[in-house]
Amino acid sequence: MLEVTGPDAAAYLDAHLTVPVSDLRPGDRRDGALLAPKGTLLGLVRIERDDRGFRLHGGTPAVVGALDRGRIGWLVELTPFASATTELSDRERVEAGIPAFGRDIDERTLPHEAGLVPEVVRLDGGIYPGKMTVLRQERSGTVHRGLRRLRLEAPVPEGATVHDDEGPLGTVGTAVVSPRGPLALALLRRRATPGSRVRVAEVSGIVEP
């Protein structure tokens, strides 16, 4: 967790994060991300504005490192803090289709693959690191993988391989048991569309919309 303060705090974050923050008022929150120059994800953050500046919740060490390296020439201060924000449980996340960085998506994942465009990774507005890659992928319409929620007949272990009749599709990320039954998030090849039948070991499942 990182507090960003100083005269240039809003402009600095606008230039680095995938969503604008300068329009936020104290108490407002917004979800965003930081990308590598090649357009892959460095991490997801929840931005909260307060009277001092901005607080970034959930940032990875890669996010903190990139923001620290990028502050040369900016009048900003970066201060780590312990977050008291209550995070969603794994069950709530999976039911809502929200990925966790490091479990469901990682530094090799593109924003379109994770379903983060355009809400968390904006196409409009100013330039941020990796945006040109995001725009090129938006224009091409080609996404080779996608984050999917699976409804399964029995619980499955995280990290297990997901198959269809043609072969491997990807691996299970977060797996939970909800009141709806066993569910999981998985980053799968694009042929795994909503309604597709899949298998995880001997457990059958279906790709949900």
Image (cartoon, helix red, strand yellow):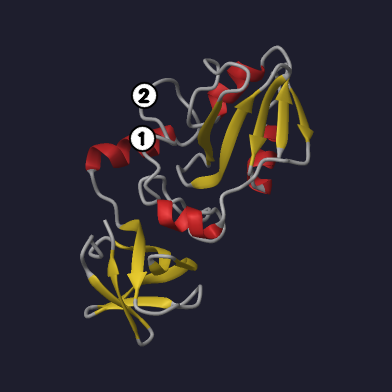
- Total marks shown come to 2
Q: Could you tell me which secondary element the residue under label 1 belongs to?
A: loop
- As shown in the figure, which amino acid type bears the numbered disc 1? Pro
Residue 15: quadrant of the picture? top right
Residue 87 located left or right of residue 122: right
**Of callouts 1 and 2, which one flags the residue occurring earlier in the amino acid sequence?**
1
Label 2, on which residue?
Answer: 124
User: Does residue 129 appear in this view?
Assistant: yes
Secondary element at image label 2: loop
Which residue is rendered at x = 52% and y = 38% of the image? 33
Q: Which residue is mark 1?
A: 118
Asked if the residue under mark 2 is in contact with the one under mark 1, i.e. CB atoms within 8 Å, the reply is: yes
Residue 93: horizontal and vertical position, in percent? 49, 53
Q: Which mark is residue 63?
A: none
Q: In the rendered view, would you say 1 is above or below 142?
A: above
Mark 1 vs mark 2: in front: 1
| Residue sitting farthest toward the front | 179
Query: Residue 169 or 75: which is nearer the viewer?
Result: 169
Looking at the rendered image, the quarter that the N terminus falls into is: top right
